[in-house]
């Protein structure tokens, strides 16, 4: 992943795939009007190291690009007025669905737009389009909503106020406020799971939770971090997707792709030099999908004053694909312990709730 501000284009192609490109006509956007550009676009060609063995781009790669676009536009907005300088830190990513796969050689166009600001947070909505540069075909692959908070460059624990935006319609502000209150409530509800940990089990049986559960340990280096010395949200999401993918592949032993990610909550910042453990375990399977819970724990090994803590958590949904790219049945998960059975039922509830949303309201019976 190239750092923001660099031009990233394919060999032999003109440098029209600039990574950072403010959209020319901000007035034509549906979001709020502001003095600084309220929308930007980044784009990059997908290379072999962005994809799995089947040539499908990793969901984590796309999530990282989404976060980079959001960080650029929110940091720019939060520094648009005279005052204390800051960097926008990712606090939450709402549920995002992977609508269609992206492949090696295609160009990802990531457009980001500020749609709401509260006193201390910025809502950014992001769309991702994939372009086949041989045929010119474009398709929508992702839509995501991210929330950022501005942290002072002088004091990382100080959250600054966000410059307000001007809305073209009063309804936009009211709708944004409702989304803000809803995500704030959901963030509070996720904190009860923070004490949960993933424990290894010797000689697990196939199709059990223990058989496929996986962990990845990563030492946070300077290239992972912001100007503050804290991990980019996109880096964390990419690692979370990698672990979830390993869990899914171990369970069904086929090509797997990310289908969706439930809301990702960033409970606390991760500092440079920390050792982070990203753990994934399967919680639920339907006929053709798998839900995987991913937990991120940070261990500040160079700071004896701070204990290990939960930094982020989320649920990822994967599907199994054949060599021809068609969905395959998923081996059914066998929960063994009472906790596993409870998590299975909770996952089933989330699955049925999302299935009902996709199908829309039921028609009234005569």
Image (spheres, rainbow, N blue to C red):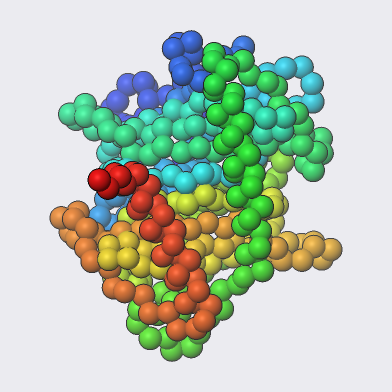
Viewer-closest of 301 and 15: 301
In which quadrant will I find the C terminus?
Answer: top left
Q: Is residue 363 above or below residue 278?
A: above
**Where does residue 118 sit, x and y in percent of width and height?**
67, 30
* Residue for point 41% across, 74% down: 212
Residue pictured at 79% horizontal, 21% vertical = 83
Please tell me whether residue 82 is drawn above or below residue 222 in the rendered image: above
Q: How many numbered marks are there? A: 0
* Coordinates of residue 276 in the picture (x, y in percent): 62, 62
Which residue appears at 32% of the width and 34% of the height?
140
Q: Work out whether residue 166 or residue 87 is closer to the camera in this orientation and state it.
A: 166
x, y percent for residue 117: 64, 27
> Can residue 214 be seen at all in this image of the molecule?
no
* 168 left or right, relative to 251: right
Horizontal side of residue 302 vs 290, given as left or right = right
Q: Residue at x 47, y 46 (%)?
A: 95
Q: Residue furthest left?
A: 324
Question: Which x, y percent locates residue 257?
Answer: 32, 55
Q: Nearer the viewer, residue 45 or 299?
A: 299
Asked if residue 40 shows in the view, the reply is: yes
Task: Tell me which corner region of the image, top left, top right, bottom left or bottom right, holds residue 139.
Answer: top left
């Amino acid at each position: 992943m190239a750092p923001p501000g660099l031009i990233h284009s394919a060999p032999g192609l003109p440098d029209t795939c600039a990574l950072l490109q403010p959209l020319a006509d901000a007035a034509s956007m549906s979001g709020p009007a502001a003095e600084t550009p309220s929308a930007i676009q980044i784009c990059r060609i997908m290379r072999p190291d962005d994809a799995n063995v089947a040539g499908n781009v990793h969901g984590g790669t796309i999530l990282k690009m989404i976060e980079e676009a959001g960080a650029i536009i929110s940091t720019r907005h939060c520094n648009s007025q005279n005052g204390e300088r800051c960097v926008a830190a990712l606090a939450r990513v709402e549920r995002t669905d992977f609508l269609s796969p992206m492949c090696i050689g295609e160009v990802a166009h990531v457009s980001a737009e500020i749609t709401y600001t509260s006193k201390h947070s910025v809502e950014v909505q992001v769309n991702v389009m994939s372009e086949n540069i041989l045929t010119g075909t474009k398709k929508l692959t992702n839509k995501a909503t991210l929330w950022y908070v501005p942290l002072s460059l002088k004091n990382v624990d100080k959250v600054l106020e966000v410059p307000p935006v001007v809305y073209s319609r009063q309804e936009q502000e009211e709708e944004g406020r409702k989304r803000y209150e809803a995500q704030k409530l959901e963030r509070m509800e996720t904190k009860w799971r923070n004490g949960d940990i993933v424990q290894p089990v010797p000689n697990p049986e196939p199709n059990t939770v223990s058989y496929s559960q996986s962990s990845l340990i990563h030492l946070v280096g300077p290239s992972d971090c912001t100007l503050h010395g804290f991990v980019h949200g996109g880096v964390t999401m990419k690692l979370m997707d990698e672990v979830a993918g390993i869990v899914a592949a171990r369970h069904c032993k086929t090509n797997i792709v990310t289908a969706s990610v439930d809301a990702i909550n960033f409970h606390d910042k991760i500092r440079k030099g920390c050792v982070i453990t990203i753990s994934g375990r399967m919680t639920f399977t339907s006929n053709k999908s798998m839900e995987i819970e991913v937990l991120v724990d940070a261990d500040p090994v160079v700071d004896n004053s701070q204990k290990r803590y939960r930094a982020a958590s989320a649920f990822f949904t994967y599907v199994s694909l054949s060599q021809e790219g068609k969905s395959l049945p998923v081996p059914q998960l066998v929960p063994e312990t009472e906790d596993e059975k409870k998590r299975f039922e909770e996952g089933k509830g989330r699955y049925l709730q999302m299935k009902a949303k996709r199908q829309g309201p039921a028609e009234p019976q005569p």
